[in-house]
Image (tube, rainbow, N blue to C red):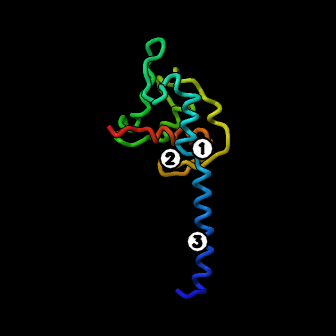
Amino acid sequence: MTIDRFLIVLPVLAVLAACIAAEQDHMPGPQEGEEIFANNCTACHDYRGEGGMLSAGVAAPDLTRISLRNGGEFPRARVLSQIDGYGRGKAKDVMPEFGSLLEGELVPVEVEGMMTPTPRPLAALLAYLESIQVKS
């Protein structure tokens, strides 16, 4: 590679690296989601996400085993639907709605192979739930 090409490629690579780093800083991670979980979910699902019995004999599911209950795959679309209230089933009647999780800037989240605009708090909670999945 000649010095002229190197002088052209180097700034392009630096800009590309800065863009990648900025996007990684911009995306919510498990740590951000853990705080949201602690503030909204622990009363029913325990601080470890392992669930337990609620009043009236209803059980909150173990959130650390979502992937195990789904053949080893974390079902992002289904989890998002359950949290945001669009999920169907018995849990919808028991689980409260968390409107504040549907507010805030939209960030792209991959759901079933497509990038989906998702409110940042919801994306952060999804990242946290995905991070606490047990292997067995």
Specify the quadrant of the image occupied by residue 23. Answer: bottom right
Return the residue at label 1.
Answer: 118
Q: CA distance from mark 3 to mark 2?
A: 29 Å
Picture disc at residue 13: 3
Q: Mark 1 vs mark 2: which is more N-terminal? A: 2
- Residue shown at 61% from the left, 48% from the top: 107
Callout 3 secondary element: helix
Left or right: residue 74 versus residue 93 is: left
- Category of crowding for the residue at label 1, using alpha-carbon neighbours closer than 10 angstroms: few (below 14), some (14–19), many (at least 20): many
- Residue shown at 44% from the left, 25% from the top: 51
Left or right: residue 35 versus residue 45 is: right
Image coords of residue 90 (percent x, y): 47, 22
| Type of the residue with mark 1 | Thr
Identify the residue at the far left of this view: 136
| Type of the residue with mark 3 | Leu
Q: Mark 3 vs mark 1: which is more N-terminal? A: 3
Return the residue at label 2.
Answer: 111
Left or right: residue 52 versus residue 115 is: left
Image coords of residue 81 (percent x, y): 53, 35
Q: CA distance from mark 3 to mark 1?
A: 30 Å
- Category of crowding for the residue at label 2, using alpha-carbon neighbours closer than 10 angstroms: few (below 14), some (14–19), many (at least 20): some
- Confirm or deny contact between disc 1 and disc 2 (CB under 8 A): yes
- Height in image: 93 above or below 3? above
Picture disc at residue 7: none
- Confirm or deny contact between disc 3 and disc 1 (CB under 8 A): no
